[in-house]
Amino acid sequence: MLLVMQKGTTKDQVRAVVAAVEKKGYTARPIPGGDRVSIGILYNKGSVDAGHFLGLDGVKEVIPVTKPYKLVSREFRQENSQITIGDAVFGNGTMPVIAGPCAVESQKQVLGIAASVKKAGATLFRGGAFKPRTSPYSFQGLGKKGLEYLALVKEETGLPVVTEVMDIETFDMVEGFVDVIQIGTRNMQNFSLLRRAGQSEKPVILKRGMSAMLEEWLMAAEYIMEEGNTNVILCERGIRTFVRHSRNTLDLSVVPAVKKESHLPVIVDPSHATGVRDQVVWLAYASAALGVDGLMVEVHDHPEAALSDGAQSLYPDQFAQVMEKMRAIRTIIEAP
Ligand code: PEP
Ligand code: MN
């Protein structure tokens, strides 16, 4: 249930409605909007008596929420959520690009790649310090050293840095070093990790589980928001299908579907979606044409020697060209 307040409602009126909701034994969540506040009612078992709340001072409308997800839903918040990180804004019609290597490999590697992606127009830097690898024998990431190199990238270039957090044990450490926390596809339904991310002050990029339905993905985001963190960016990174010509299948149609259901920004990662450099390029253009709220792209200065995901990493020059063409595409495509 959602209580929509009248325009120009005072803080005291909102407080009084919240108190009235809580007196009934429910939880109230004020949601600031463009020109009016709404108050979500959570944890109601069964239906709530709309008439009771309609009579309260300042309440304009009472809307039943029909979806299982609440805080992430468009029913709760009509306007797109905008999330500002450094110079980038996700959700305002622009298309910030997060770029960098799959894994942080050395100080020289990240500083070099960061300088080139920044020059090409990327506004955030990515790099994994703790890597979720299929094989325990593959490179697992530099761990804390990798986080230190990311902090150095931020210091030297000013680019906010994004990295994946794999577990609760390392959460505090990762959170202390980076600007944005990424939850990877393999952890999309790690509910305790989602809750911990929800207690963080840092924005969270929530990748779609490789077999997740739209509803499951949004429910995962709900876990984060329910704990109080409203800065959630959804990232489509390809799903498992029967094909062999690419690593995953980029589900572009999920983007407009999510935007219809949710106010959260949605970005696309064409790198993990395809696993193949040449496909990344075209799907980056397709994503730009779709009006996505941003992209995440893997870039490596020596992909042939990369310790992970070399085959899908763009060369820095190639990335610069892709950025230029995406900008051109965006001049004729408006975000939905
Ligand atoms: C990554 O971005 O480094 C990564 C491992 O992505 P995903 O969780 O989408 O596989
Ligand atoms: Mn990768």
Image (spheres, grey):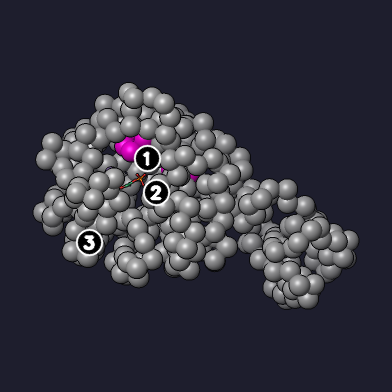
Q: Position of residue 120 (x, y in %)?
A: 25, 41
Q: Amino acid at mark 2?
A: Arg
- Disc nearer the start of the sequence (1/3): 3
Q: Amino acid at mark 1?
A: Asp
Disc 2 packing (10 Å; few <14; some 14–19; many ≥20): some
Specify whether residue 55 is painted magenta: no
Q: Which residue is mark 2?
A: 186
Numbered disc 2: secondary structure: helix
Numbered disc 3: secondary structure: loop
Left or right? Give the position of 112 relative to 122. left
Give the alpha-carbon distance from disc 1 to disc 2, as whole Å: 15 Å
Work out which quarter of the rendered image holds the C terminus and state it.
Answer: top right
Q: Is mark 2 within 8 Å of ligand 1?
A: yes
Q: Which residue is mark 3?
A: 143
Front: mark 1 or 3: 3
Q: Position of residue 254 (x, y in %)?
A: 52, 35
Residue range of the region highlighted in magenta in the rendering? 266-273
Q: Residue furthest front?
A: 136
Q: Is mark 1 within 8 Å of ligand 1?
A: yes
Front: mark 1 or 2: 2
